[in-house]
């Protein structure tokens, strides 16, 4: 995460999962049928590489 602050508006950006490590790359996260799933333990992120950012205004 990074933030640059000017007088009235800070600008920020956030990066998540930079190495794109996902549990779903190694196998399914559930077994069984769709109506009766058996979920495995979650030990890694499930999302891809994520970037978000924004501007905050000070009044």
Image: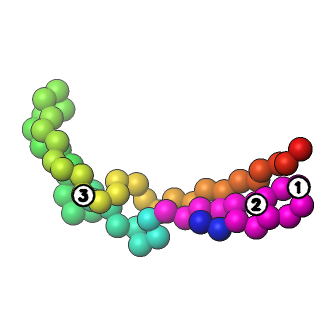
Q: Secondary structure at mark 3?
A: loop
**Distance of label 1 from label 3 (alpha carbons):** 41 Å
* Frontmost residue, 33 versus 7: 7
Q: Which residues are magenta?
A: 3-16
Q: Residue farthest to the bottom?
A: 19
Residue depicted at 21% across the width and 63% down the height: 26
| Picture coordinates of residue 18, whole percent (x, y) | 46, 70
Residue 41 image point, x, y percent: 18, 50
Instruction: Name the residue carrying label 1.
Output: 8
Q: Residue at x 43, y 59 (%)?
A: 48
Marked residue nearer the N-terminal end (1 or 3): 1
Sequence-wise first label, 2 or 3: 2
| Scheme of colours in the image | rainbow
In this rendering, would 47 be left or right of 24? Answer: right
- Please name the predominant secondary structure of the magenta segment in the image: strand
The one nearer the camera, 4 or 29, is: 4
């Amino acid at each position: 995460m990074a933030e640059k602050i000017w007088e009235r508006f800070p600008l920020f950006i956030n990066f998540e999962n930079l190495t794109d490590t996902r549990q779903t790359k190694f196998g399914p996260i559930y077994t069984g049928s769709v109506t009766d799933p058996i979920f495995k333990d979650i030990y890694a992120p499930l999302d891809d590489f994520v970037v978000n950012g924004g501007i905050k205004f000070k009044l």
